Image: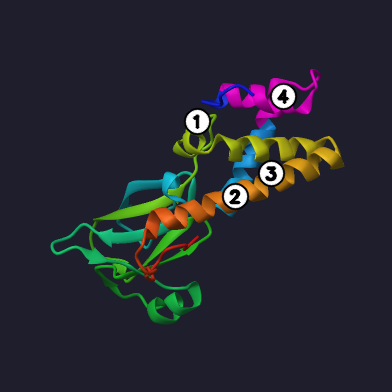
Amino acid sequence: MAAITNYSTLQTEIEANLHRSDISSATIQGFIDLAETRLREDLMVREMETAVDVTISAQTASLPTGYVGIRRFYLNTSPTLLLTYLTPDVFWSTYASSQVSRPIAFTIEGENFVFGPTPDATYTGKALIYSLIALATTDPSALLTSNPNLYLYAGTLEAAIFLDNDRLAEKYGLLYREALKSKKKSSRADRTGSQALRARPISGVR
């Protein structure tokens, strides 16, 4: 197997795993798209962390591109103010009125952040999010560089499902699950080292 270092070499290796020469590049790219959807559903690890600024000038703001989840979110004020995540039902029971002030909380609905109270001015929110932008746009990703096997197994699995190849799907499904399990384990160790686990206020919010 050749080294997988970018979008192009990933496509080459998926094609090699299929032992087929009749599958177009566009089709293989479609398998990678599906693999990335699978990875977004299954992973939130350090390589997916991205610091972004969010302009908060209305009650809602669009989620950043490739958004998967969020680790922390604060207003860039003096002093800084950590925004508290609330589930939608708790959020609206608290901020259903037309109250206008500096936001202190947020929730997520659809493809938007929703802030409460509704902002009385324009603020800059500093967020550390988990994101996975398609390789077709950002090549390579940090996750591909650190774990090309995850992309390869997930992409080949999607191809096997498309081709209705049960033997290949079983093989690469197992390889993907094992690689995923290993990545999650190493990610936990990377986070905690020898320290005891501590709860984070909004980690894992999707």
Q: In this rendering, which labeled residue sits more in front, label 2 or label 4?
A: 2
Mark 4 or mark 1, which has the lower sequence index? 4
Q: What's the distance in space between the residues labelled 3 and 4, CA to CA?
A: 17 Å
Considering every residue shown, the one lying at the far top of the view is: 21
Mark 1 or mark 2, which has the lower sequence index? 1
Q: In this rendering, which labeled residue sits more in front, label 1 or label 2?
A: 2
Type of amino acid at the residue the image marks with label 4? Glu
- Label 4 secondary element: helix
Is 154 located above or below residue 200 in the figure? above
Type of amino acid at the residue the image marks with label 2? Leu
Q: What's the distance in space between the residues labelled 2 and 4, CA to CA?
A: 22 Å
Q: Residue at x 51, y 55 (%)?
A: 185
- Quarter where residue 47 is shown: top left
- Residue 81 location, x and y as percent? 23, 66
Query: Which segment did they paint magenta?
Result: 8-29
Q: What's the distance in space between the residues labelled 1 and 3, CA to CA?
A: 26 Å
- Label 3 secondary element: helix
- Residue 86 location, x and y as percent? 42, 73
